[in-house]
Image: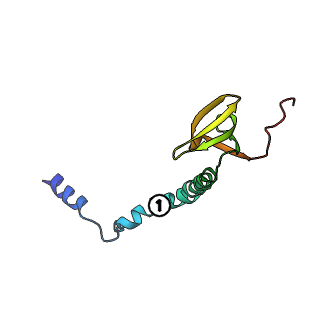
Amino acid sequence: MIFGAFLSQAQQPTPGAAAHPSMFMSLLPLIVIFGIFYLILILPQRKKQKKHMEMVEKLKAGDRIITTAGIFGTVMGVQKDRIELKIAANTKIDIAKSAVGVILGATDAPPDKTG
């Protein structure tokens, strides 16, 4: 009986105890962390991706490019989802548009191999 009375008193809040924080205040640190994460990582990546897509959309036949795999070539044709690339005499390959790394331009030559 004494033990039961002790438990009932332990479960009742004391007058000086602090109230539980609201749900919003509990989630506020997570919201702030997500905001910082968005500003530092996601937003710059979206800008970079948009810039790359604009660059790829400007490609036309005759442009020289370097793929993300390091292959030098000349654009022979541009299709909806891929690019026909001439990498050597009588050698053409199709690559995905997302594989374009750098556009050298129509008149730029690849770096000198004698290096």
Could you say whether the residue bearing mark 1 is in a helix, strand or loop? helix
Residue drawn where x is 23% and y is 64% of the image: 12
Closer to the camera, 99 or 30?
Answer: 99
Q: What x and y, as percent, mark residue 40?
A: 59, 56
Quadrant for the C terminus, please.
top right
Residue type for callout 1: Pro
In the picture, measured across the screen, residue 74 lies left or right of residue 36, that is right
The answer to whether residue 7 shows anywhere in this view is: yes
Please, which residue is most extreme toward the front here? 90
Closer to the camera, 3 or 88?
Answer: 88
Q: What x and y, as percent, mark residue 45?
A: 58, 53
Q: What x and y, as percent, mark residue 91?
A: 65, 28
The answer to whether residue 21 shows anywhere in this view is: no
Using a 10 Å C-alpha cutoff, classify the residue at mark 1 as few (fewer than 14 neighbours), some (14 to 19) or many (20 or more). few
Residue drawn where x is 54% and y is 55% of the image: 42
Residue drawn where x is 79% and y is 44% of the image: 108
